[in-house]
Amino acid sequence: MAAWILNFGDKPYFSHTAIKVMTAMKMILRWFPHGDDSVTLAQIRQIPCVTGVATCLPGVPVGEVWPLAMLRALRDEIHAAGLEMEVIESVNVHEDIKKGLPTRNQYIEQYNQTLRNLAAVGVKCLCYNFMPVMDWTRSELAHPLEDGSTVLSYRHEAVLRMNPAAIGDALLGDARGYSMPGWEPERLGAMQEDMRFYQNVSRETYWANLQYFLDAVVPVAEEAGIFMGIHPDDPPWPLYGLPKVITSAENIQTFLALHDSPNNGLTLCTGSLGANAANDIPAICRTFAGRMPFAHVRNIRRHAPRDFDESAHPSACGDFDMYAIMKALYEGGFDGYIRPDHGRMIWGEKARPGYGLYDRALGAAYLLGLWEAIGKR
């Protein structure tokens, strides 16, 4: 699906040796536009072997069509910095679609038009999620580690003591003024009502609503040449009585069978799935590498079955064997995009929680080193 060579002017960005070793994978970084990020495109361009960014249009309300003119302007800005815009993360799915309301057809058509607009500006991969009400949940955004860095953290009992609106207020308060996808202020007011709605929605009904969405959008993605990758539930266990469906290898297999198409795939998130120690991440990589257009790769340190801190990327810093994960992806023929996922806040940096420059740059270099070593062994 992807190739490593990227041209700037008349010269390839990588040497022929690097092209030989690093074929069929691209390393990218998450980046938020329109002044909503402390990290600049120029800084990302200087991280060795990072070819592009996964980006978004955060100012467009959920459910509305992403304007073609705005997408072209965003692409041109990214290209001018010497980077690619082949991955979007994410076009959020309107809650009416997840609920299966009669209004979902209107929002699905608008989603499909966004897919067509994305294809028109060269987007090849779309990461999205189908999580009800909340895209992700943490109890802290700046939990201190022993080395003095801070990380995103989850303590299950603390989360249960807070309602979603309270969590949203706490997260936004710790966000340093940056937007928090999935916790937009306009969504917080509807959370309690949405929570009540889902108490009467069975998992079977939720699976059916997801299939309805896939049956309507995947054919458009096929025509547009866009590979869609659903993000796992974060965290991957029941919370507040909400239906959770992308939580395990068994559920991933069920999801892929709902609409069997190469354009219907998984965004691997090692941190999300790996929060549950029962999930064998290397095995998931080996099994589904051919249906993964995108991978978020990070490490975590578990403290209890449902308590964890995010950590630095190397294996020694958390509970994951990162070599085994990257080896499983490589040997499974993974040919999509990888980004180092959330990083620690280190060296006095003040940035969007989880998305500072320094630790993610270290993570990208580490993952690229693993990939090269696996290819040369």
Image (cartoon, grey):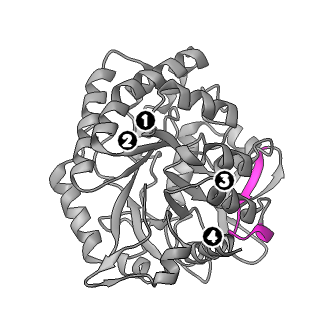
Q: Do the residues labelled 2 and 1 touch (CB within 8 Å)?
A: yes
Point out which mark residue 189 bears. Answer: 1
**Element type at marker 1?**
loop
Kind of residue sitting beneath label 4: Trp
Instruction: Say left or right for 124 vs 233.
Output: left
**Element type at marker 3?**
helix
Label 1: how many Cα within 10 Å (few below 14, some 14–19, many 20+): few
Point out which mark residue 371 bears. Answer: 4
Choose the circle earlier in sequence order: 4 or 2: 2
User: Magenta span covers which residues?
Assistant: 306-317
Residue 58 position in % (x across, y down)? 34, 53
Choose the circle earlier in sequence order: 2 or 3: 2
Asked if residue 202 can be seen in this view, the reply is no
- Residue highlighted by disc 3: 271
Spatial CA distance of label 4 from label 2 is: 41 Å
Q: Which residue lies furthest to the right in this view?
A: 304
Asked if residue 17 can be seen in this view, the reply is yes
Q: In this view, does 77 lie above or below 48?
A: above
Point out which mark residue 186 bears. Answer: 2
Q: Are marks 4 and 3 in contact (CB under 8 Å)?
A: no
The residue closer to the viewer here, 309 or 317, is: 317
